[in-house]
Image (tube, rainbow, N blue to C red):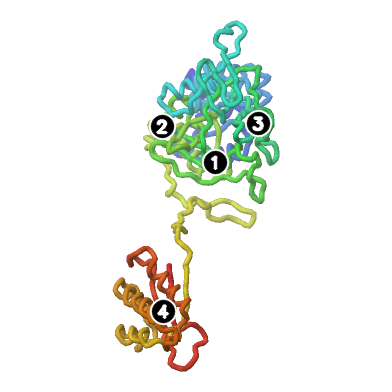
Amino acid sequence: LYRHTFFSIILYVSPQGWERQIVVGICAMMKKSMSKPMTQILERLCKFEYITVVIFSEDVILNEPVEQWPLCDCLISFHSKGFPLDKAVSYAKLRNPLLINDLNMQYFIQDRREVYRILREEGIDLPRYAVLNRDPDRPQECSLIESDDHVEVNGEIFQKPFVEKPVCAEDHNVYIYYPTSAGGGSQRLFRKIGSRSSVYSPESSVRKTGSYIYEEFMPTDGTDVKVYTVGPDYAHAEARKSPALDGKVERDSEGKEIRYPVMLTAMEKLVARKVCLAFKQTVCGFDLLRANGHSFVCDVNGFSFVKNSMKYYDDCAKILGNIVMRELAPQFHIPWSIPTEAEDIPIVPTTSGTMMELRCVIAVIRHGDRTPKQKMKMEVRNPMFFELFEKYGGYKTGKLKLKKPKQLQELLDIARQLLADLGQHNDCEIEEKKSKLEQLRTVLEMYGHFSGINRKVQLTYLPHGQPKTSMFECECV
């Protein structure tokens, strides 16, 4: 029974009385609507007591007039290759359902020029860029001067390395051009094919046909940050190896691209909110580049889901269900509830069951900036050295460490005195080798003064004859 011109409401009798089902329509190409992330989220969305999900078949979308499309109260629809966006817009005008993702804004998302314009108007940081429009009717708008290590686009100079992007967002053939000092050539990015996402080319000249965006290359740490919003107050982020490196896609043992969990800063969360609201896309993915201490948005992809994250699937379904219920069934007074990362234990499926998902690695790393230890060893037999044992209580333990400047000065004075005696009387009863005493004096005289912990002396007392190792050690550390 249909009670409203714009909303189709299915009524049925239950023991508790009259209740209504809210129909959520999924209008997308079959590859998208039947994908694993979509399936996982819809299964959870159906657990809402008053929500029913209807998936529009691809044959109906492509071949049937919009008047024959299924009725729904809420529409989740998004563009992908081959999708008739015009028909979806017409359907939305005809039935006026609640739109999770605005359809008209999806025209803008398909044009990188419009994406950059909207981002700039919203005050979101972008790489420095210029647009080269090759329009035969307006050739004055196209000014490109190319040199070995830079291009000048409409008066804007871009030194290599710079990025060249087709204005059509569906064209993923993005090129990065390198300076001659780095060997020249270009890295050619494309949609993942097997285990590759880019390839190096010796070609250093920019493309001469088509319209492009030229932008400054942003030096990152070798990763791109992918951000996925579900409404303006929720954003999931993860990093992947940048395709601009060597073009090889990192995959795990199951063949899935490896992603790394990322914590967004407060400023990045604000950017995610702005992107979601500016493009009117509740479910929206975009790319961030973290470079020079700042984050720059370099692409907005529109409707996209996180892959292989049970926590994200739970959160996404909960948020979408709450949005639908608040808008179409306000009498239930559904509260605002934003899932947080700490709400549930992150469990992911594996080939051997389930296990906790790694979300963060915290490391305390000690620097290795130290001078390697230098050690000098020598045997001593002169009573002047033994007096130090007597003076500082070394006989109690058989070991003695000298670190204080006064103690080291006493040892230096002994070395000087013994060397002076050897110089005056070659036949004097000094058993220490002259070369060793000179080495000891040199070590202790280094830097001109005693300070810090850069030197110490270790004395070992061996009363039972000839030692197997040194009796006396002088270390420089």
Q: Is residue 381 above or below residue 158?
A: below
Q: CA distance from mark 1 to mark 2?
A: 38 Å
Q: CA distance from mark 2 to mark 4?
A: 100 Å
Q: Is residue 440 above or below residue 351?
A: below
The residue indicated by pointer 1 is 223
The amino acid type found where label 2 is placed reads Arg
Q: Are marks 2 and 4 in contact (CB under 8 Å)?
A: no
- Residue 292 is left or right of residue 209, and the answer is left
Q: Residues within 10 Å of mark 3 (few under 14, many from 20)?
A: some
* Residue sitting at x 41%, y 40%: 265
Mark 4 or mark 1: name the one nearer the start of the chain.
1
- Towards the viewer: 297 or 217: 217
Q: Are marks 4 and 1 in contact (CB under 8 Å)?
A: no
The residue indicated by pointer 2 is 326
* Residue sitting at x 46%, y 78%: 434
Looking at the rendered structure, which numbered label has been put on residue 185? Answer: 3
- Residue 72 is left or right of residue 247, and the answer is left
The residue indicated by pointer 4 is 423
Q: Residues within 10 Å of mark 4 (few under 14, many from 20)?
A: few
